[in-house]
Protein backbone atom coordinates (compact mmCIF):
# COMPACT_ATOMS: atom_id res chain seq x y z
CA UNK A 1 0.00 0.00 0.00
CA UNK A 2 1.33 3.39 -1.02
CA UNK A 3 0.72 5.96 1.73
CA UNK A 4 1.15 9.71 1.55
CA UNK A 5 1.39 11.75 4.73
CA UNK A 6 0.65 15.45 4.47
CA UNK A 7 1.64 17.98 7.11
CA UNK A 8 0.53 20.01 8.81
CA UNK A 9 -3.11 18.95 8.66
CA UNK A 10 -4.37 22.47 9.37
CA UNK A 11 -2.74 25.85 8.95
CA UNK A 12 -4.18 29.29 9.66
CA UNK A 13 -2.02 32.28 8.78
CA UNK A 14 -2.27 36.01 8.19
CA UNK A 15 -2.28 37.48 4.71
CA UNK A 16 1.27 38.25 3.56
CA UNK A 17 2.96 35.43 5.48
CA UNK A 18 5.02 32.69 3.85
CA UNK A 19 4.41 29.00 4.44
CA UNK A 20 5.67 25.56 3.49
CA UNK A 21 3.68 22.34 3.61
CA UNK A 22 4.83 18.79 3.02
CA UNK A 23 3.87 15.54 1.40
CA UNK A 24 5.92 12.52 2.50
CA UNK A 25 6.00 8.82 1.76
CA UNK A 26 8.25 5.82 2.22
CA UNK A 27 7.40 4.78 -1.34
CA UNK A 28 8.85 5.99 -4.61
CA UNK A 29 6.45 7.57 -7.05
CA UNK A 30 6.85 8.02 -10.79
CA UNK A 31 5.34 11.49 -10.47
CA UNK A 32 3.44 13.59 -7.99
CA UNK A 33 0.55 15.96 -8.42
CA UNK A 34 -0.72 18.81 -6.24
CA UNK A 35 -4.36 19.81 -6.29
CA UNK A 36 -6.29 22.60 -4.57
CA UNK A 37 -9.91 22.08 -3.58
CA UNK A 38 -12.10 25.01 -2.57
CA UNK A 39 -15.27 24.53 -0.50
CA UNK A 40 -18.14 23.15 -2.57
CA UNK A 41 -15.90 22.35 -5.53
CA UNK A 42 -13.81 19.48 -6.83
CA UNK A 43 -10.01 19.38 -6.73
CA UNK A 44 -8.19 21.33 -9.44
CA UNK A 45 -4.71 20.34 -10.57
CA UNK A 46 -1.99 22.87 -9.74
CA UNK A 47 1.14 21.07 -10.92
CA UNK A 48 2.70 17.71 -11.77
CA UNK A 49 6.34 17.04 -10.86
CA UNK A 50 8.09 14.15 -12.53
CA UNK A 51 11.86 14.34 -12.10
CA UNK A 52 13.63 13.89 -8.75
CA UNK A 53 14.76 17.30 -7.49
CA UNK A 54 12.46 19.14 -9.89
CA UNK A 55 11.24 22.60 -8.91
CA UNK A 56 8.22 24.19 -10.51
CA UNK A 57 6.83 27.65 -9.90
CA UNK A 58 3.25 28.80 -10.35
CA UNK A 59 3.15 32.52 -9.53
CA UNK A 60 3.66 32.64 -5.73
CA UNK A 61 3.62 28.84 -5.35
CA UNK A 62 6.84 26.81 -5.53
CA UNK A 63 6.68 23.03 -5.73
CA UNK A 64 9.62 20.71 -5.23
CA UNK A 65 9.90 16.97 -5.79
CA UNK A 66 12.40 15.21 -3.54
CA UNK A 67 15.56 13.78 -5.07
CA UNK A 68 14.41 10.24 -4.27
CA UNK A 69 10.88 10.94 -5.57
CA UNK A 70 9.37 10.02 -2.20
CA UNK A 71 8.36 13.46 -0.98
CA UNK A 72 7.37 16.91 -2.08
CA UNK A 73 6.93 20.38 -0.65
CA UNK A 74 4.81 23.37 -1.52
CA UNK A 75 5.97 26.84 -0.55
CA UNK A 76 3.63 29.83 -0.81
CA UNK A 77 5.09 33.32 -0.73
CA UNK A 78 3.02 36.23 0.58
CA UNK A 79 -0.14 34.18 1.04
CA UNK A 80 -3.45 35.73 0.05
CA UNK A 81 -7.04 34.92 1.11
CA UNK A 82 -7.56 33.43 -2.35
CA UNK A 83 -5.03 30.72 -1.44
CA UNK A 84 -7.46 29.35 1.14
CA UNK A 85 -8.45 25.77 0.44
CA UNK A 86 -7.60 22.09 0.83
CA UNK A 87 -4.25 21.17 -0.73
CA UNK A 88 -4.02 17.55 -1.83
CA UNK A 89 -0.96 15.71 -3.03
CA UNK A 90 -1.26 12.56 -5.09
CA UNK A 91 1.50 10.15 -6.02
CA UNK A 92 1.46 8.08 -9.19
CA UNK A 93 2.69 4.52 -9.34
CA UNK A 94 2.42 1.85 -11.96
CA UNK A 95 0.34 -1.30 -11.79
CA UNK A 96 1.10 -3.19 -14.97
CA UNK A 97 0.74 -0.97 -18.01
CA UNK A 98 -1.41 1.57 -16.22
CA UNK A 99 -0.69 3.99 -13.43
CA UNK A 100 -2.88 5.04 -10.54
CA UNK A 101 -2.93 7.90 -8.07
CA UNK A 102 -2.78 7.64 -4.30
CA UNK A 103 -3.99 10.73 -2.47
CA UNK A 104 -2.97 12.15 0.89
CA UNK A 105 -5.54 13.40 3.42
CA UNK A 106 -4.85 17.00 2.48
CA UNK A 107 -3.81 20.20 4.21
CA UNK A 108 -6.48 22.74 5.10
CA UNK A 109 -5.09 26.25 4.65
CA UNK A 110 -6.88 29.35 5.87
CA UNK A 111 -5.44 32.76 5.03
CA UNK A 112 -6.95 35.59 7.08
CA UNK A 113 -7.25 39.06 5.54
CA UNK B 1 -20.56 23.22 -21.54
CA UNK B 2 -17.11 22.50 -20.19
CA UNK B 3 -15.34 20.10 -17.87
CA UNK B 4 -16.93 17.49 -15.70
CA UNK B 5 -20.51 17.94 -14.50
CA UNK B 6 -22.07 15.99 -11.64
CA UNK B 7 -25.72 15.82 -10.66
CA UNK B 8 -27.30 16.13 -8.24
CA UNK B 9 -25.07 18.38 -6.14
CA UNK B 10 -26.78 17.29 -2.92
CA UNK B 11 -28.71 14.13 -2.12
CA UNK B 12 -30.42 13.02 1.07
CA UNK B 13 -31.77 9.51 1.11
CA UNK B 14 -32.98 6.85 3.47
CA UNK B 15 -31.21 3.55 3.84
CA UNK B 16 -33.84 1.70 1.82
CA UNK B 17 -33.96 4.12 -1.11
CA UNK B 18 -32.50 3.61 -4.57
CA UNK B 19 -30.90 6.59 -6.27
CA UNK B 20 -28.29 7.29 -8.94
CA UNK B 21 -25.48 9.79 -9.26
CA UNK B 22 -24.64 11.08 -12.71
CA UNK B 23 -21.37 12.32 -14.18
CA UNK B 24 -20.83 13.78 -17.63
CA UNK B 25 -17.57 14.93 -19.19
CA UNK B 26 -17.17 17.09 -22.28
CA UNK B 27 -13.40 16.77 -22.56
CA UNK B 28 -13.17 13.83 -24.95
CA UNK B 29 -11.45 11.74 -22.28
CA UNK B 30 -11.37 7.95 -22.34
CA UNK B 31 -10.95 7.22 -18.63
CA UNK B 32 -13.43 8.02 -15.87
CA UNK B 33 -13.28 7.53 -12.12
CA UNK B 34 -15.47 7.52 -9.02
CA UNK B 35 -13.91 8.67 -5.74
CA UNK B 36 -15.30 8.89 -2.20
CA UNK B 37 -14.15 11.84 -0.07
CA UNK B 38 -14.80 11.60 3.67
CA UNK B 39 -13.63 13.96 6.38
CA UNK B 40 -10.13 13.25 7.68
CA UNK B 41 -9.54 10.49 5.12
CA UNK B 42 -7.65 10.44 1.83
CA UNK B 43 -9.63 10.40 -1.38
CA UNK B 44 -10.65 6.78 -1.92
CA UNK B 45 -10.69 5.47 -5.47
CA UNK B 46 -13.82 3.37 -5.97
CA UNK B 47 -14.06 2.50 -9.66
CA UNK B 48 -12.10 3.11 -12.85
CA UNK B 49 -13.47 2.87 -16.37
CA UNK B 50 -11.49 2.92 -19.59
CA UNK B 51 -13.41 3.12 -22.87
CA UNK B 52 -16.59 2.06 -21.05
CA UNK B 53 -14.94 -1.03 -19.59
CA UNK B 54 -14.52 -1.32 -15.83
CA UNK B 55 -10.86 -1.90 -15.11
CA UNK B 56 -10.77 -1.47 -11.37
CA UNK B 57 -13.09 -2.09 -8.44
CA UNK B 58 -11.39 -1.30 -5.17
CA UNK B 59 -13.28 -3.69 -2.89
CA UNK B 60 -16.34 -1.48 -2.98
CA UNK B 61 -19.51 -2.96 -1.40
CA UNK B 62 -22.10 -4.21 -3.87
CA UNK B 63 -24.57 -1.57 -2.69
CA UNK B 64 -22.61 0.73 -5.03
CA UNK B 65 -23.07 -0.23 -8.68
CA UNK B 66 -21.33 1.76 -11.42
CA UNK B 67 -22.43 2.03 -15.03
CA UNK B 68 -20.62 3.56 -17.99
CA UNK B 69 -22.89 3.55 -21.08
CA UNK B 70 -20.42 5.57 -23.16
CA UNK B 71 -17.13 7.36 -22.68
CA UNK B 72 -18.84 10.64 -21.75
CA UNK B 73 -21.20 9.38 -19.06
CA UNK B 74 -20.72 7.60 -15.77
CA UNK B 75 -23.34 6.64 -13.22
CA UNK B 76 -23.19 5.37 -9.67
CA UNK B 77 -26.32 3.48 -8.65
CA UNK B 78 -26.99 3.42 -4.92
CA UNK B 79 -29.08 0.88 -3.04
CA UNK B 80 -29.52 0.08 0.64
CA UNK B 81 -26.78 2.42 1.78
CA UNK B 82 -25.48 2.73 5.32
CA UNK B 83 -24.92 5.90 7.39
CA UNK B 84 -21.15 5.52 6.96
CA UNK B 85 -21.66 5.97 3.22
CA UNK B 86 -22.42 9.65 3.79
CA UNK B 87 -19.64 11.53 1.99
CA UNK B 88 -18.77 13.64 -1.03
CA UNK B 89 -18.68 11.51 -4.16
CA UNK B 90 -16.40 12.87 -6.85
CA UNK B 91 -16.24 11.93 -10.49
CA UNK B 92 -13.07 12.54 -12.50
CA UNK B 93 -11.79 11.95 -16.00
CA UNK B 94 -8.40 11.77 -17.69
CA UNK B 95 -7.23 11.37 -21.26
CA UNK B 96 -6.64 7.64 -20.83
CA UNK B 97 -5.15 5.17 -18.37
CA UNK B 98 -1.66 4.96 -19.75
CA UNK B 99 0.55 7.09 -17.52
CA UNK B 100 -2.66 8.40 -15.97
CA UNK B 101 -0.65 9.39 -12.94
CA UNK B 102 1.22 11.90 -15.05
CA UNK B 103 -1.93 13.27 -16.62
CA UNK B 104 -4.21 15.73 -14.89
CA UNK B 105 -7.43 14.34 -13.55
CA UNK B 106 -10.34 16.67 -14.09
CA UNK B 107 -12.83 16.52 -11.24
CA UNK B 108 -16.46 17.44 -11.03
CA UNK B 109 -17.74 19.40 -8.04
CA UNK B 110 -19.14 16.27 -6.45
CA UNK B 111 -22.42 15.05 -5.00
CA UNK B 112 -22.79 15.57 -1.25
CA UNK B 113 -24.61 12.43 -0.09
CA UNK B 114 -26.29 12.14 3.30
CA UNK B 115 -27.82 8.86 4.46
CA UNK B 116 -30.52 9.13 7.10
Image (cartoon, helix red, strand yellow):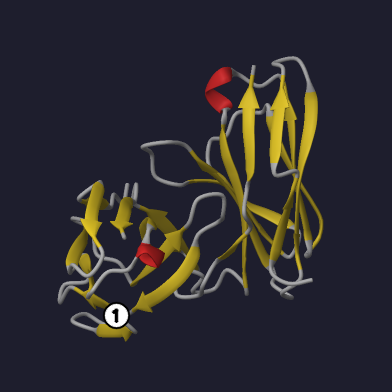
Q: Is residue A38 above or below residue A53?
A: above
What residue sits 25% from the left and 46% below the top?
A9
What residue sits 23% from the left and 51% below the top?
A11
Task: Report whether A56 appears left or right of A101.
Answer: left
Q: Is residue A57 above or below residue A48?
A: below
Farthest right residue in view? B69
Asked if residue A91 shows in the view, the reply is no
Spot occupied by residue B57 in the image (x, y as percentages of width and height):
59, 44
Q: Nearer the viewer, residue B57 or A61?
A: A61
Spot occupied by residue A57 in the image (x, y as percentages of width and height):
30, 84
Q: Is residue A1 above or below residue B113?
A: below
Q: Nearer the viewer, residue B27 or B5?
A: B5
Which residue does the numbered mark 1 point to in the structure image? Answer: A60
Q: Is residue A27 above or below residue A65?
A: above
Task: Report whether A18 appears left or right of B10.
Answer: left
Asked if residue B3 shows in the view, the reply is yes
Task: Report whether B78 appears left or right of B83.
Answer: right
Task: Report whether A77 appears left or right of A101.
Answer: left
What residue sits 30% from the left and 58% below the top?
A111
Spot occupied by residue A61 in the image (x, y as percentages of width and height):
29, 77
Q: Nearer the viewer, residue A106 or B104?
A: A106
Quadrant the C terminus of chain A occupies: bottom left
What residue sits 64% from the left and 22% below the top?
B115
**Chain label for disc 1:** A
Amino acid sequence: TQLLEQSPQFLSIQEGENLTVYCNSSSVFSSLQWYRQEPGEGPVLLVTVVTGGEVKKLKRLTFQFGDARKDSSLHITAAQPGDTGLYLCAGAHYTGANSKLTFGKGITLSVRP
Amino acid sequence: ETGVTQTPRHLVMGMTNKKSLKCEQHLGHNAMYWYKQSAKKPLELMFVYSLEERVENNSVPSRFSPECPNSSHLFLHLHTLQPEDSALYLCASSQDLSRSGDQPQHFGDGTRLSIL
